Image (cartoon, rainbow, N blue to C red):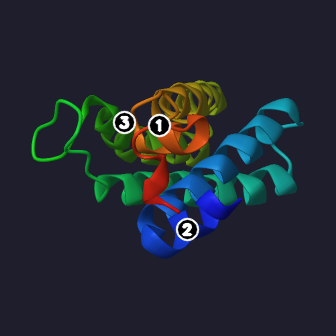
């Protein structure tokens, strides 16, 4: 718990990214398991879009110069570009009544940008992975 309080104080952008990403992960799972097309689905869908958008926006400003990178951008930043392109497309599909394409786009976004990107983020040697598993960077947030 102290690590996350330290993270909030010393790295507020990373803390924001973590909170919105975990929120998107949990809400997204709930959304995938519940009934679709209801008023609450649309409302919670907009909340999920905001969480995903916030996560992607924050990640655009997070740099990692320890891993192979180009100006601090690592391969995991490709998920940022993917979300920036696919999230509006998924919304567009829903607005046009193309429910099947909307469903596929949002499911793929959830799996790729929440689950897969989240797993990459938690690898040892990555900032959040080091916080979780301990390691050379674990003292950064404390």
Q: Which residue is mark 1?
A: 135
CA distance separating discs 1 and 2? 16 Å
Residue 66 in percent (x, y) is at 22, 39
Q: Nearer the viewer, mark 1 or mark 2?
A: 1
Using the rendered view, name the quadrant where residue 114 is placed.
top right
Q: Is residue 64 left or right of residue 9?
A: left
Per the image, label 1 sits on a secondary structure element best described as: loop
Kindly indicate whether the residue at mark 3 contacts the one at mark 2 (C-beta within 8 angstroms): no
Name the N-terminal-most of marks 2 and 3: 2
Q: Which residue is mark 2?
A: 6
Per the image, label 2 sits on a secondary structure element best described as: helix
Kindly indicate whether the residue at mark 3 contacts the one at mark 1 (C-beta within 8 angstroms): no
Q: Residues within 10 Å of mark 1 (few under 14, many from 20)?
A: some
Q: Residue furthest left?
A: 71
At 19% from the left edge and 44% from the top edge, which residue is drawn?
65
Residue 86 in percent (x, y) is at 42, 38
At 50% from the left edge and 34% from the top edge, which residue is drawn?
113
Instruction: Tell me the quadrant of the picture where the N terminus can be found.
Output: bottom right
Give 13 or 99, whichever is nearer the viewer.
13
Q: Which residue is mark 3?
A: 82
């Amino acid at each position: 718990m102290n690590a996350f309080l330290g993270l909030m104080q010393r790295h507020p952008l990373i803390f924001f990214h973590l909170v919105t990403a975990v929120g998107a992960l949990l809400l997204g799972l709930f959304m995938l398991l519940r009934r679709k097309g209801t008023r609450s689905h649309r409302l919670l869908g907009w909340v999920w879009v905001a969480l995903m958008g916030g996560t992607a926006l924050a990640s655009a400003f997070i740099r990692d110069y320890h891993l192979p990178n180009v100006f601090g951008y690592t391969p995991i930043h490709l998920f940022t570009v993917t979300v920036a392109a696919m999230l509006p497309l998924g919304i567009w599909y829903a607005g046009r009544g193309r429910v099947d394409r909307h469903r596929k786009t949002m499911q793929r976004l959830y799996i790729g940008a929440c689950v897969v990107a989240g797993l990459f983020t938690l690898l040892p040697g990555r900032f959040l992975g080091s916080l979780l598993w301990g390691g050379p960077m674990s003292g950064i947030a404390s």
